[in-house]
Image (cartoon, helix red, strand yellow):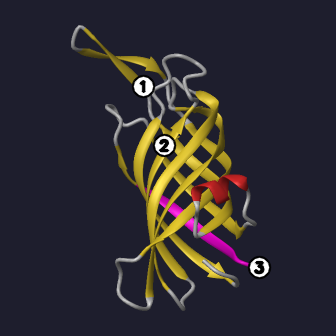
Amino acid sequence: MSGWETFIEVPLVDFSEFGDATPWRVGVTRESRRDPIARLLRHDGVRWVATLGYSEVRDVFVREMGTPVRKARGRATPTVSLARRWFWEVPVVPDGWSLDAGIEFGVHYAARSVPADGTHFQFVLAPGLDLQPVDGPWRVGLRWLHLSNGNVRPGNSGYDGLSLQFGCRFGGRK
């Protein structure tokens, strides 16, 4: 198994009420052997995903009697994550192209809380689509990035946003 890939992920849209964060990620992925979860999901491929990132975290506000009041102060923070990505080929594109639907699930750590009222340790859940030429190394993907502590600490609004990924494969399959 020699299928490595590098990628960069840039935020497009933040769906929170007050704009909690703008997470940027760079990462590497590697082809992975099938595991019991992968067999259960009947996937077309599975990869390990490791990222380093940076997030500009904004102040978190709540509405009190219709007026926004700052709940927590935001700051910039470095981040790191480790996850698994399972994907399935979607047969709706012309010959020579590949469209994959996938989901990434793992753990995420930020040096400062993301969002500002959240926690350092969170889970990452990122469903998305990837388009790539069958014989080429390049890939473009669209992700719904969700970061949350799974309500381990009440009051954490989490992060939801749409992001764009650009990747390049080195050997192996997609």
Q: Residue 60's mark?
A: 1
Which amino acid type corresponds to the residue marked 3 in the rendered image? Ser
Q: Is residue 5 magenta?
A: yes
Vertical side of 173 occupied by 110: above or below: above
Q: Is residue 24 visible?
A: yes
Residue 4 coordinates in the image, percent (x, y) = 70, 75
Q: Give the labeled residue for mark 2.
A: 146
Considering depth in this image, is 129 or 113 the residue closer to the camera?
Answer: 129
Vertical side of 139 occupied by 156: above or below: above
Left of 92 or right of it: where is 31?
Answer: right
Of the numbered discs 3 and 2, the one sitting upstream in the chain is 3
Q: Does the magenta stretch include residue 160?
A: no
Residue 158 coordinates in the image, percent (x, y) = 48, 32
| Residue at disc 2, secondary structure | strand
Considering depth in this image, is 165 or 73 the residue closer to the camera?
Answer: 165
Q: What stretch is highlighted in magenta?
A: 1-11
C-alpha distance separating marks 3 and 2:
29 Å
C-alpha distance separating marks 1 and 2:
17 Å
C-alpha distance separating marks 3 and 1:
43 Å
Q: Residue 2's mark?
A: 3
Of the numbered discs 1 and 2, the one sitting upstream in the chain is 1
Which amino acid type corresponds to the residue marked 2 in the rendered image? His
